[in-house]
Amino acid sequence: MAHLLTKSKYIRGLQCLRALYYDVHHAKWAYYPPETLAKFRQGRDFEKTFKDTFPNGIDISARLHSRMASYPTLTAELLSQPGEVVLFEAGFIYNDVLVLADVVHKQPDGSVIIYEVKNSDHVSDTFRNDVSVQHYVISHALPNIIPTDLFCSKLKLTNFFLLFHDEQGQFQREDLMEFAKSMEESIEKKVALFKETILLPTAPAVEQSSHCDEPYACPYKRSCKWKG
């Protein structure tokens, strides 16, 4: 299934439309300093620690690797199976936006709990935006996954938890379902803007400012030629 945006590109677009354009058309220009790459590795390690609490989980990324277009199809096949199913890196697509969910836990009655895992001791606005765009895609994609001719419960998203840790390193969670629902209209508008942006013939003019370092240092800062 083709897509124009991903969760990470949506978050990039919230920070800067020019960076979003680079992310799609000039990704090789991105530069991440060693300390940032180390944080990425730490984040993956923390995520794995939580995933290990689901010993029967199926890792879709281990099966499909970089074949992103196939993630939603395999996800739908696995979620259509009766009984409990736990998936890692499950793929969903809606309105040309592809998201991969860290942990998807389907209950026997068809209710679905999703966990987004962050190696942090607090819940930031960026994390809330992350969960919100996932909710936007998944809440629309789930009802269409199971064909009506299958004798199986329809899928329904019931909880969307952000999983983080306290100062002692213990797992904590915050349910962001209601917050994510409140963001849907805003997300719809931003998705439309972001899709228009990446289809432009050239990168949009965005003056360099404080947004270049907030909430993250832009990986294209060294390649960005726009000074205003």
Image (cartoon, grey):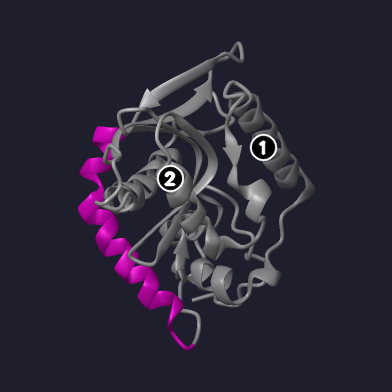
Query: Chief secondary structure of the magenta span?
Result: helix
Task: State the residue at coordinates (67%, 37%).
Answer: 44
Looking at the image, is 37 positioned above or below residue 70? above
Q: Is residue 163 left or right of residue 218?
A: left
Q: Is residue 108 left or right of residue 3?
A: left
Q: Is residue 210 visible?
A: no
Return the x and y of residue 105 as percentages of the image width and height: 44, 31
Q: Is residue 146 magenta?
A: no
Return the x and y of residue 212 as percentages of the image width and height: 54, 58
Task: State the residue at coordinates (64%, 55%).
Answer: 64
Name the amino acid type tagged 2.
Answer: Asp
Q: Is residue 223 left or right of residue 202?
A: right
Task: State the residue at coordinates (50%, 67%).
Answer: 20
Disc number placed over residue 44 in the picture, else none:
1
What is the magenta range? 177-201
- Find disc 2 in the rendering and name its residue: 130
Which of the 4 image quarters holds residue 132? Answer: top left
Q: CA distance from mark 2 to mark 1?
A: 16 Å
Looking at the image, is 168 positioned above or below residue 27? above
Q: Is residue 186 magenta?
A: yes
For this rendering, which residue is in front, 213 or 117?
A: 117
Total labels: the figure holds 2
How packed mark 2 is, by other alpha carbons closer than 10 Å (few <14, some 14-19, many 20 or more), is: some
- Give the farthest residue toward the bottom: 201
- Whether pointer 2 and pointer 1 mark residues with C-beta atoms closer than 8 Å, the reply is no
Name the amino acid type tagged 1.
Answer: Arg
- Give the farthest residue toward the right: 34
Q: Is residue 208 visible?
A: yes
